[in-house]
Image: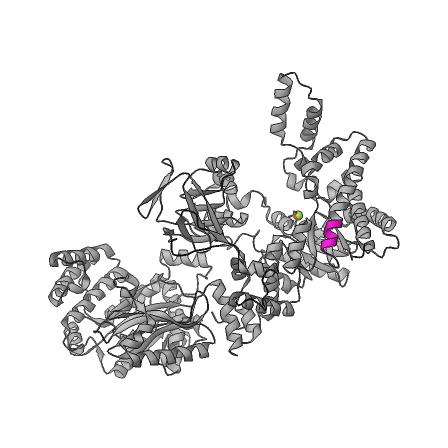
Amino acid sequence: MAAQETVDHKYVYDFAEGNKDQKVLLGGKGANLAEMTNLGLPVPPGFTITTEACKAYLATGEEPAGLADQISARVGALEAAMGRKLGDPEDPLLVSVRSGAKFSMPGMMETVLNVGLNDRSVVGLSAQAGGNDRFAWDSYRRLIQMFGKTVCDVPGEEFEHALDDAKRAKGTTNDLDLDADDLRGLVDAYKKIFSKHTGREFPQDPREQLDLAIKAVFESWNAERAVVYRRQERIPADLGTAVNVVAMVFGNLGPDSGTGVAFTRDPASGAQGIYGDYLANAQGEDVVAGIRNTVPLQELEKLDKKSYDELLDYMARLEGHYKDLCDIEFTIERGKLWMLQTRVGKRTAAAAFVIAGQLVDEGLIDLDEALHRVNGAQLAQLMFPRFKLDHEFQPVAKGIGASPGAAVGKVVFTSARAVELAGEGEQVILVRRETNPDDLNGMIAAQGILTSRGGKTSHAAVVARGMGKTCVSGADELDIDIPGRKFIVAGQTVREGDVVSIDGTTGKVYLGEVPVMPSEVVQYFEGELDPEQTDDPLVKAVHRIMTHADAKRRLAVRTNADTGPDAARARRFGAEGIGLCRTEHMFLGDRRELVEKLILARTDDERDSALAALLPLQRADFEEIFREMDGLPVTVRLIDPPLHEFLPPLEQLAVNVAVAQERGEDVAKEEALLAAVRRMHEENPMLGLRGVRLGLVIPGLFAMQVRAIAEAAVTVTRAGAVAKPEIMVPLVGAVQELETVRAEAEKIIAEVVGDSGVEVLIGTMIEVPRAALTAGQIAEAAQFFSFGTNDLTQMAWGFSRDDVEGAFFWRYLELGIFGISPFESIDRDGVGRLVRIAAEEGRAARPGLKLGVCGEHGGDPESVHFFHEVGLDYVSCSPFRVPVARLEAGRAVVETTGSDSR
Ligand code: PEP
Ligand code: MG
């Protein structure tokens, strides 16, 4: 029974049998060829071998049972459809064998063209082509070259050298000067190369050629470059590739033939029109190889009006059918148009928004679908400043856009030099082959980072993204000489101190200073560009889609801000309150002295007087924020970090004291400080005396802050605004901690608030695993929870959040232990589970408990979807990420209804 099932399993689909929704089984190319066939478009006949056949082959090293027979049956049908037979010496059928996975992986896997040619059928091909011997022998030599290289691992250079030799003998550098006899000679040379490397003759049996080519495509799924590409693009490794076997059509049969690509809209700007390139008398690979220059697609109208009109008609039909931008590959063989490929086309971030808006206008999609088709990463990209590029700036190299933004600065080659020059006020770009943890200081000091090695998950890329620094990695055209403090690119030498400009979005590198311009999307969010007045299509599209996202979303979006200007900006960006106002920043600068007094206090009086001096300053801080956030909730977190962070570092202090003592100076104050720093020194300060623990140990500290918050709220309210303070206690792990702080706070609040009408909520962060696990108890004492997913991630994994990203995450990413840093995107299975438990148990104990998140994850697109799913009330993120969170919160709602169109 089992054997019967295996035999019957369908591994091969004719193009007429599939459709566009079968990408998992037939790959993107196969599914779309089937769709075009069913639409009645002129697709050369062919069939697709499924990804399941590939997976079975890769698992066992053998073709699955039944595959060979199914291929035979389909080849027979293909021969009948074309009226030609594989290997026929008079009138041969030739096929192409192409890979095609669910997700497009350009150039990563194999293709073999002209399968079916041999010493005899080459003559028949010439006859088919009207006695064109040159064409036939050129096709044959291309087959041996491609087949040798991709199927039998013959080094490609050997074929290239032989081709160069043939051209040299002819006294030319142009392939087209080689005539039929030259190419026949080249076929002999290629066959010798083939047998030298493989120990066998070039296979003359077309079916053997076909079977070997199919296996080579299967195996190319696991080729190193494909594996690396998948890892970078986060494409699952277990999908496998389909194989498309298609009757060959030729664009190189004379001036009435050619090949081209077309887009139904401009993939860069989204503008409607006819975009594409055409090359007469050529095959697709000639376009890729750049042997001759293409002409704009519009020129085809003059060359072949009939094919041009037909192509335009198909383009319109495809766009209407797919309801999206399509890209197309086509070939014209002696005046007959053939459609070789189509797919929903890749596009820039700007084009994604513009096209989604246009498609709504055209009635092809609704606003939900438009929202589904854009994303927060694209929006974030549109918010970075960009280079203002005109003709004078040409890139000299292109690497990987590893961390977006536009950075300009003087080239430096070492971390130390970066720190030194930055200290002198210079903007620098740190150039390294690859960075390592020793480069961290230089990376912090630099405007941007440029490396010649490494991909999106290299050390440089991961660390730069974490810091929000522009980074281009893997610009391998750069020949870097670190000891010589120079690099060579495009024949030019760039030395330390020369200025370069790097674009972390496109990966392009420019010599000299390229002017930078602000993003028009940010100008729109800032309220400087009126979407009704501007005629910028991008701003209009962003406005429309954001408005829809806001109407759809259930999650509120707040911001993390601790100054008036930050709060104001976030409000302009759409923040609906402050989810985290960190108060520790308010203890720095000229207030350090007061904090030192507080720490050094030996008596209650000394401590109380330091706190009394801090109180009016804190009150003023909160008044400013409450005024900016008039009418919106403001969550103020009581001081969190260990107090020694406000004191000078131990080593520096020890040296200062020693030097001063040596000179006989009065060091009483410094000695006291040093003693305090020594006393407070902790091996693991992130797990030490901080947060609520500090509040319970230092009398009056939290009380001063609570009083400042309540008094500020009353003052602002009496002045006519509405203050909605929420006091948040950090690092709580046990309900008793919260109860103690709360009892004291409530007394102060009652005393301050009086009959002012101000209401102050008291809640807690959930950022210690124990708090998540005892959330039911903690909820009894908390009016709200806010998840501090930074600390929760740190403590759930046991990863020091300050150290590990630069230290070893690149290795974890390389090994696939995680696909993305858990500090960047929530670890759903581990940390996310703690969030779920706390949300459920908290709400069970206190129905309607307000739940939010204020860790960095609050602005991460993937994580926003998770927080929507878990049922939080709001996310809170840095001001710049507020629009991204609004968009993603809207997308989270429409996600289940949208289509999987890309
Ligand atoms: C957190 O831990 O997620 C948090 C928001 O607090 P902080 O980053 O200030 O520790
Ligand atoms: Mg925290």
- Overall secondary structure of the magenta section: helix
- State the scheme by which the image is colored: one colour
Total residue callouts: 0
Q: Give the x, y percent position of residue 623.
A: 76, 49
- Identified at 69% across, 60% down, the residue is 576
| Looking at the image, residue 454 lies above or below residue 167 | above
| Looking at the image, residue 27 lies above or below residue 770 | below
* Residue 175 placement, left or right of 308: left
Farthest-out residue, front? 533
Q: Looking at the image, can residue 575 be seen?
A: yes
Q: Give the x, y percent position of residue 112.
A: 28, 67
Magenta span: 623-629
Q: Give the x, y percent position of residue 257.
A: 25, 75
Q: Residue 82 falls in which quadrant of the image? A: bottom left
Asked if the stretch drawn in magenta spans residue 364, the answer is: no
Q: Residue 283 falls in which quadrant of the image? A: bottom left
Q: Residue 368 falls in which quadrant of the image? A: bottom right
Instruction: Work out which quarter of the rendered image holds the N terminus and state it.
Output: bottom left
Q: Give the x, y percent position of residue 104.
A: 41, 65
* Residue 374 placement, left or right of 171: right
Task: Judge by depth and name the residue closer to the eye, 464 or 497.
Answer: 497
Q: Looking at the image, can residue 404 be seen?
A: no
Task: Judge by depth and name the residue closer to the eye, 410 or 694.
Answer: 410
| Looking at the image, residue 644 lies above or below residue 168 | above
